Image (cartoon, helix red, strand yellow):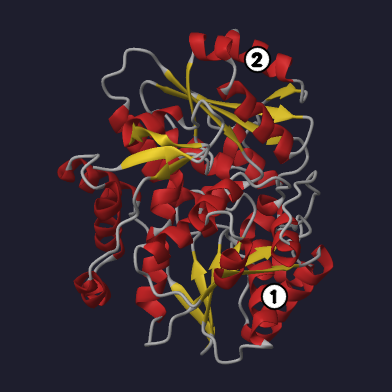
Amino acid sequence: MMKLYSTNNKQKLFTLGEAVLKGLPDDNGLFMPSYIPKLPSVFFEKLPSLSFPELSFAVANALIDGAIPYSELEKIVFGAIDFAAPSIALDPKTHILELFHGPTLAFKDFGARFMARTMSYFNRNEDRELTILVATSGDTGGAVATGFYDIPGIKVIILYPKGKVSHLQEKQLTTLGKNITALEVDGTFDDCQALVKQAFLDAEINSHLRISSANSINIARLIPQSFYYFEAWKQVFDGQAPVFITPSGNFGNITAGLFAQKMGLPVKKFIAANNANDVFYHYLQTGEYTPKPSVQTISNAMDVGAPSNFARIMDLYGSTWNNVKQDIQAYSFSDDATLSGIQEVFDQYQYIIDPHGAVGYLAFKEHQKQNPNDIGIILETAHPSKFIDVLPKEIANQVNTPDRLSTLAHRKKVATQISIRFSEFKDFLLSR
């Protein structure tokens, strides 16, 4: 049965239910599986014939290892993974994995929907309400809000940085109501994330409220994000292990890819595609990890100056810099370069890519200069309609905005404004 430990203490083990409902260990580490199983060769032989939900269930069942009963896990996975993740070939070497076909048009839907169902399962016998705290730099908030909307026994409080998410992203997390509350923080994503982490360590808050997290610090977010690496491999694999290019902010997405690799998925290399928030890029160059305040960019979901999941990457590699460099490369690109990438993809392939995917595209093209024969799978993490306001005008005019997003434009935003002072956030929580 799956057990987990804190990255700050490998001696004390937790059940999956404890880890999911706590979100964050009391010692401010992150939960990690005590064991990541290798999938048998028969799984990879059968993989081409498996549907996306079927392969997702097989991966989850192996990793979770009985922590959720078979029939319950099957319901969770098949209920969460009910939309596609198609791979689109720009050319024979360059593939785009579209992860935006879920309800909120972002890859975060995979994690949020799985986590909401998993959390609801573990919370089913609890008398006290569970309060989910989540910081968002863009798409996480909308996905979590939709994933947890109207689930009994659970309330969600979303913290987002004022003026630093797109208009429609903001509407996704501020217009639902019911059990979803939005806090507009006068600061950055890192400030929002710091408030959430501090709340988990505050004894008074924890004595008054049952709290958990829905950020990628929660292990239930990471597990389902590994599924689509297998789905991408199934669609693209032709005997040559691919390179996965992952737009990277809080580094949950690439950590999930590393989980998939440890479970046996053939991967030649991971590329962490960074915008101007390039702390990880500098780590790979120098061996020194130096978090710094995040800066605002047009690829806002990656605007993270202190990526939480760095601790998990260090745990996977024993903090050995040379080992990390063997598996992961990183590149960093400015907004101007990102816009040029969007234009290039449109001009060369008649494909409209969002700013996050564009950073991934640029990273792969840079990688190809030394590795022209590599096959790359670029994770396209959000639908371009979320970024109409930053796309070049002639491209923006050709974007079809899905109804589930366009209908939000005229809904009334409801959000409570707070500062970055923890005392103010604490007062808000204790008053509820």
Label at residue 362:
1
Q: How crowded is mark 2: few (under 14 residues within 10 Å), some or many (20 or more)?
A: some
Choose between 344 and 378: the one closer to the eye.
378
The residue sitting at 61% across, 29% down in the picture is 197
Above or below 194: residue 113? below
As drawn, 197 above or below 337: above
Q: In this view, does 67 lie above or below 199?
A: below
Residue under the point 79% across and 46% down:
292
Q: In which quarter of the image is residue 423?
A: top right
The one of 403 and 339 positioned closer to us in this rendering: 339
Per the image, label 2 sits on a secondary structure element best described as helix
> Which residue is the extreme one toward the right?
336
Residue corresponding to mark 2 = 426
Between the residue at mark 2 and the residue at mark 1, the CA separation in whole angstroms equals 42 Å
Kindly tell me whether residue 356 is visible in this rendering. Answer: yes
Badge 1: residue crowd in 10 Å (few <14, some 14–19, many ≥20) = many
Where in the figure is residue 255, as x and y percent of width and height?
Answer: 51, 56
Question: What is the secondary structure assignment of the residue under circle 1?
Answer: helix
Q: Where residue 194 sits: x, y (%)?
A: 68, 31
Q: Where is residue 161 in the image (x, y as percent from the top left)?
A: 73, 36
Taking 137 as reference, is 43 left or right?
left
Q: Residue furthest left?
A: 71
Q: Which amino acid does label 2 sit on?
A: Lys
Query: Which comes before the other along the chain, label 2 or label 1?
Result: 1
Task: Give whichever of 127, 204 is nearer the camera.
Answer: 204
Q: Which residue is drawn at 75% across and 46% down?
A: 291
Quadrant occupied by the N terminus: top left
